[in-house]
């Protein structure tokens, strides 16, 4: 950990020697007079603070990834490259993304505009321009039609071979381990585990989309941090004939790209998970580490009989998802254990689907999430059933009694009616400002009915 903490900001080296590692990049930029990046919510919800971070995928290719600078602790930055809105115009010449917004009248008060510009910038160089490119950006005055027009205009313009293109094409400089004060960034699992032994009170931190919210609000989350996001082996995604192994720190947007079409439940859930900027950083490991009762990836693990791979200095062990969640935010993972991967078995012949009910598609918490896996034998009788829910109990849970009821039955009207009745009574959910307990119970049944309607003749 001897490397000096330096990162590249808009092509120039910046030292982080005196930085407070838990300060968000957003506040750090603003304090240095770089006021182009705006603070709207400091919670990851509005996108006003969007910057582009260079990330390399599993094949070593560099991409600009839009992320929320309000959630990104500066301690995670050494060795990284960040582009903010200040770098885009070349003297008086606007960047094509900015020109498109001007041409289409995509800005009024302008407060949200730098965030939109940076989301579009990342999409432009990644050839990922559509209405969802700016799904994580809120605008309260212009309205979205002109911004969508600007997006469409950009799809017609090939990105120029400019300095941003050159930055992406430059040879890969691997990230090395570095520390900013008590924020440690190892590059190997063994070093991470060793650091945890030396600093037992340290918190693991991956994409910081959960912890970053607390840090952004000045909460002292932990006396030290061991960051996992530059450990290459934790970001690997392996697909074999009988399983899919997802590195605990692979960002969710990489799962969207690499696993598209392979795990229907993930394909269906990920578009409902937060928004692009958050998915560019959020991880499976962080979802499991938070173990929230409304963590959207957790019912998927329960329904697909996944295993969770954990490691500490004593060795590695696999924990079945069914045994992982113990009580409200309590799991079977020991404090010094690192989640290294989740392993999803691949089974043919199973109907699976994931549903999330929330008040908005983007950046909203589940009222209820449900993930189902059913298999019928040659006689059309259920021979395997998993009905997993989030948002209905203190932990993500399977409706085990109802699963047992389904076994050996045909999925006829009578079975479905009886299953629905049982599902309505299977959990004792809470009422809160999002939904009543009755509504949540009703959703447990109606989502199952929808699943059967969508997946059986
Ligand atoms: C605007 C916004 C929208 C969101 N929307 C959703 C949503 O729709 N659905 C949803 O489920 N969540 C949502 N979240 C929550 C969050 O994005 C997810 O929980 C995400 O998966 C966390 O991953 P992370 O890598 O950012 O975790 P971090 O914030 O880095 O860490 C979270 C916790 O996990 C621990 N941890 C991280 N990695 C590991 C590991 N490998 N081993 C052991 N412990 C670990 C950390 O110590 C910490 O306690 C949202 C968050 C924001 C800010
Ligand atoms: S300030 Fe709103 S997402 Fe960062
Ligand atoms: S232009 Fe005013 S909030 Fe978007």
Image (cartoon, grey):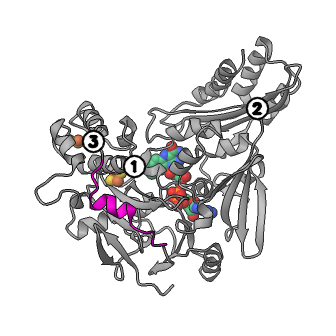
Horizontal relation, residue 416 to residue 50: left or right: right
Whether the magenta-drawn stretch holds residue 17 is answered as: no
Q: Which residues are magenta?
A: 159-174
Q: Nearer the viewer, residue 434 or 180?
A: 180
**Mark 2 touching mark 1, by CB under 8 A?**
no
Query: Which residue is depicted at the point 49% across and 35% down?
Result: 434
Q: Earlier in the sequence, mark 2 or mark 3?
A: 3
Label 2 SS: loop
Give how far across and how far down residue 104 sits, in percent: 18, 35
Q: Quadrant of residue 103?
A: top left
Give the answer, above or below, for where 24 lies relative to 186. Answer: above
Marks 2 and 1: which is nearer the front?
1
Residue beneath disc 1 = 126
Give the CA distance from mark 2 to mark 1: 35 Å
Q: Earlier in the sequence, mark 3 or mark 1?
A: 1
Q: Position of residue 96 (x, y in %)?
A: 22, 47
Comparing labels 2 and 3, the label whose residue is closer to the camera = 3
Local crowd size for mark 3, using a 10 Å CA cut-off: few (<14), some (14–19), many (≥20): few
**Residue 350 numbered mark, or none:** 2
Q: Dot 3 corresponds to which residue? A: 157
In the picture, which quadrant includes the C terminus? top right
């Amino acid at each position: 950990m001897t490397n000096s903490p330096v990162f590249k900001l808009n092509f120039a080296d910046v030292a982080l020697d005196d930085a407070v590692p838990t300060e968000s990049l957003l506040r750090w930029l603003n304090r240095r007079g770089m006021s182009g990046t705006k603070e709207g919510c400091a919670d990851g919800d509005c996108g006003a603070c969007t910057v582009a971070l260079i990330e390399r995928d599993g094949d070593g290719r560099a991409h600009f990834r839009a992320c929320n600078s309000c959630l990104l602790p500066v301690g995670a930055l050494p060795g990284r490259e960040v582009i903010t809105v200040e770098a885009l115009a070349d003297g008086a010449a606007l960047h094509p993304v900015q020109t498109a917004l001007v041409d289409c009248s995509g800005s009024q008060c302008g407060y949200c505009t730098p965030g939109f510009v940076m989301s579009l910038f990342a999409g432009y160089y990644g050839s990922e321009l559509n209405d969802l490119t700016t799904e994580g950006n809120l605008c309260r005055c212009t309205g979205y039609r002109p911004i969508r027009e600007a997006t469409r205009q950009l799809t017609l313009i090939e990105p120029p071979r400019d300095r941003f293109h050159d930055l992406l094409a430059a040879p890969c400089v691997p990230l090395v381990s570095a520390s900013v004060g008590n924020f440690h960034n190892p590059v190997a699992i063994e070093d991470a585990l060793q650091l945890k032994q030396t600093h037992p009170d340290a918190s693991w931190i991956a994409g910081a989309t959960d912890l970053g919210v607390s840090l952004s609000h000045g909460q002292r989350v932990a006396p030290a941090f061991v960051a996992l996001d530059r450990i290459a082996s934790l970001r690997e995604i392996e697909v074999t004939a009988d399983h899919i192994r997802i590195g605990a720190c692979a960002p969710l947007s990489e799962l969207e790209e690499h696993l598209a079409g392979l795990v229907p439940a993930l394909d269906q859930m990920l578009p409902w998970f937060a928004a692009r900027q958050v998915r560019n950083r959020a991880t499976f490991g962080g979802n499991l580490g938070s173990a929230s009762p409304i963590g959207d990836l957790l019912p998927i693990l329960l329904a697909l009989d996944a295993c969770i791979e954990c490691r500490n200095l004593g060795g590695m062990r696999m924990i079945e998802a069914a045994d992982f969640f113990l009580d409200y935010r309590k799991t079977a993972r020991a404090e010094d254990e690192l989640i290294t991967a989740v392993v999803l078995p691949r089974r043919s012949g199973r109907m699976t689907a994931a549903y999330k009910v929330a008040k908005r598609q983007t950046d909203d918490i589940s009222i209820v999430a449900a993930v189902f896996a059913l298999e019928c034998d040659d006689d059309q009788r259920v021979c395997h059933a998993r009905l997993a829910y989030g948002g209905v109990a203190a932990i993500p849970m399977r409706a085990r009694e109802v699963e047992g009821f389904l076994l050996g039955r045909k999925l006829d009207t009578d079975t479905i009616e009886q299953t629905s009745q049982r599902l309505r009574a299977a959990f004792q959910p809470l009422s809160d400002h999002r939904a009543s307990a009755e509504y949540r119970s009703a959703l447990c049944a109606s989502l199952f009915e929808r699943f059967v309607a969508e997946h059986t003749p």
